[in-house]
Image (cartoon, coloured by chain):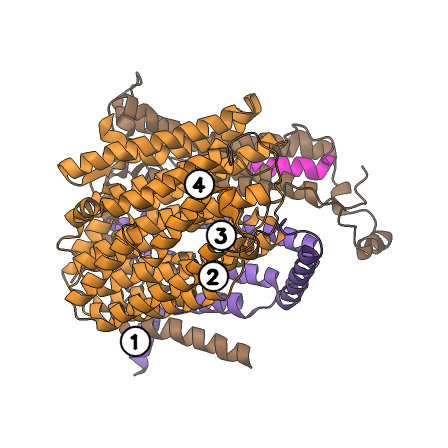
Chain colours: A brown, B purple, C orange
Amino acid sequence: MRRAITIILLIVSITVPFIAFDVLPAIGDPASAPNTHVSDYYIEHAIEECNSPNMVTAVIVDYRAFDTMFETTVMFLAGLSVVIILANRPKSRIPAPASLKRLRDTSGNPVYRTVNKDVMISIIEPVILIYAMYVLFHGEISLGGGFQAGALIGMTYLLDIMVVGRKRPIFNLPKDNSAALAGIGPFIYALTGFISIIGGGLYLEYNKMPLPVHQAELHSLGITAVEIGVTIGVAGTIITILNALMERISFDDDND
Amino acid sequence: MMTTIDAFLAAKGIYLLTLLLLSLGVAGVIVCNNYMKKLICMNVMQVAVIFFFLCLGQKDPGTIPVAMNEAVKAAEYINPLPHGLMLTAIVVSLGTTGVGLSLLLRIKEKYGTIEEDDLLKKQAQQARRDKKRRELHHPGDDE
Amino acid sequence: MTANIPVLVILLPLCSALPCLALTKVNRHLGNAVVKIACLGSFVLSVIQLTEVVKNGPIHYAIGNYAVPYGIELVIDSLNAVLLVAFSLIGILTLIFAGNFGDRKRPMMIAAANAEIALLITGLLGMTSTGDVFNLYVFLEITSLSAYCLISLGGSRGVVSAYRYMLVGTIAATFYLLGIGILYGATGTLNMGDMAKILNEGGHDNAMLVAMCFLIPAFGIKMALFPFHGWQPSAYAHAEPGSRPLITGVMGKVPALAMFRFFFCIYGTDFRFVRLSLILLGVFSVIGMLYGSIMAMGQSDIRKILAYSSVAQIGYISLGFAIGTPISLAGAFLHMLGHAFMKGGLFFCTGAIRYKYGTADIDNFGRIYKKMPLTCGLLVIASLSMIGIPPTVGFFSKWYLALGAAGRHEWIYIAVLVISSLLNAVYFFKLIEKVFIRQSAGLKERWKSEEFELPVSIILPVVVCFLAILGLGLFNVRIIDILLMTLEGVGL
């Protein structure tokens, strides 16, 4: 009863002001304030100023690149926090629940043992990695970018571990190393900003970077460097969280 | 009467749905007794705000913000800014969830439960035990 | 290079924290040394920046050199230049201090904890200096995530309080996001100055009111204002001992600065419901000041005493906002500065006592002054400052608050100020009595050390806080002048 009252009170107190005061612009209205003031500038100037037809990429890694730098740092921070919080190994492992054993008796091996390793490692994983590279370097032109590429690379590692077990993965990254790697990614991002300071500009001002290429190319180069940093950071963080959690929970039936 | 309601729902109905989702999430965080459920409700709440921002970025005749040809007109593309902002919010919610899950793991290992009232009971027991131990042995050595 | 100082102040701690783990892989001391040097550099640069701002007026730094509403902007006026100096000073002191706690056999863990502290400093400095509402959110999340982690390092009770703080803190962040979403819907911009300009053209009063209903709880939770303070006492008490001064001293103040930015810089005094919102804030802070002091009187663990006293002290700051005249705002900011050093200093003391004797129960503190004269000196001066006895900074900040309240004939606020100070006196004199008069409890030292009293890395923060409390008190007129450079014309 108390629960119902709380929920109803909250719903009323959050939704009623919006109806009563009618403060929000209508959805899809082309003349509303968010659709006119700043957004028009982004849409019309993204190509000439940032050399990037994908306007979302232009916004996140050029106009508001400072935000994205700290966003990548948040990823690193999350990975680091998980490592620190789970650093002390427990005295006893969490035992495998009895239901799991019964399940295996009735329905055979768990799914990950039925996967064909040769198909997975030699065919599917390279395709995913190539696609990740495509998403990374094509991010400024079409959809995609560093976060997606990093997630794909992290996913490859996950697949790898699921197929061959964590004792013998293809490329082995202990959690200390992967946490260090996750820190290197945002560091590359931050250094890219410093290059333009060396060239006499302000922080993250890509067209002041002292590099011997055409003026229009500088923005593309800057965006690519930043996206590489994001990719490394995200991939490192995913692998770190995976490692930290796996050290913690390893069921006793894990014997391959 | 009906037409005004219709017009209101067409223009702002989705805001109401997202706010409903938000208030359900907040209520869940406050009301639920299980810490895992609280974490799930927290995620629901964050997703609701993401939807809310995406509503602000909608523009009626617009398409996705990737330039198709050289001549770009502002009216043809939707607002790219909320999408960029929400990418940040998604990453932040991912990070918070990861930290929350690892904290939950620690709580479960230490106290053997993630129900709030059980946990409070066990903490009170632990405090009493610590106090007794401190009085018996030597002053000091708190955790 | 000098033009880039505003961004370098934020970036130096960040750029040292990110490769810290990789550097520790190379050499076990390299990572920590780099973090400390970078934070020291950030402090030096913030001092240079303060002199620059005092001489030439506010600095506007556009990142990426984009025109104002399109890019992100850092705004350094005299207000946050002063706060940046204080916060980065406490940050570097905490880093030095934290080296004494933690497991020495595991260099990677120490490096990771140091990186967390450096990222917390980055988040706090960034929140202080940013001029963009969404950028503020990102820094807020960096601050909160590193704080969750540092709180959870303080043992099993720390983990539970970190989890509870995480749930509440995420509600606050979500509400903040919703609030700026409403303002973005009304104005279409995210830059603070631009938003203020559009809102002051009028016609947005309803949107501002609804946004405010979400922003007050958001900032209230983050700064532990009275009805939203539930997470705070256990989180402050059970945080990791090394980083506790930074968490308790600075973390509650920065959201208060953000609240000031929203209420006085963005909303302005032309806002139709300004009186209403100030009265609401005043009620919260008055109840909080009394409640925090009364709760603190009942505790015997020094960490809990100080944590509850923080609820009361945050009340003083928001009371300054609620009165709303320039002089009371200056008082609130002086209290913010002073309280950062007082509370930070008191937690340096408790950390030092814990380091030497391993206790936090004030019943065990009998005649501890004979063995730890310097630490007890800071304990006494910070306690006196909390009560508000001249010439410490606590007296002058309360004096300016009372002056502002008298200017607006708010006699209730003055009465509550006096009552709350008397209540403070009760429990701080109890503490002083325990330290000086009570019989010794026969504590055993945990470490046998040759040094005088304590290692230098603990003595240094203690001495600096001691000097800062006295210095802020003695030179309060100069500081108020600097603060008023910005605050003149702001407020009622």
Q: Is residue A162 magenta?
A: yes
Q: Which residue is mark 3?
A: C435
Mark pair 4, 2: CA separation:
49 Å
Q: Nearer the viewer, residue A152 or A138?
A: A152
Mark 4 burial class by Cα count in 10 Å: few <14, some 14-19, many 20+: some
Q: Which residue is mark 2?
A: B45
Discs 4 and 2 lie in a common subunit: no
Discs 3 and 4 lie in a common subunit: yes
Discs 3 and 2 lie in a common subunit: no
Decide: marks 3, 2 in contact (CB < 8 A)?
A: no
Quadrant of the image occupied by residue C77: top left
Disc 3: which chain? C
The residue furthest right is: A105
Secondary structure beneath label 2: helix
Q: Residue at x 30, y 79 (%)?
A: B3
Disc 2: which chain? B
The label number, if any, that marks residue C374 in the structure image:
4
| Of labels 3 and 2, the one closer to you | 3
Mark 3 burial class by Cα count in 10 Å: few <14, some 14-19, many 20+: many
The residue furthest bottom is: B1
The label number, if any, that marks residue A20 in the structure image:
1
| Of labels 1 and 4, the one closer to you | 4
Task: Report the side of A248 relative to C377 (left or right).
Answer: right
Quadrant of the image occupied by residue C93: top left
Mark 2 burial class by Cα count in 10 Å: few <14, some 14-19, many 20+: many
Residue type, mark 4 in image: Leu
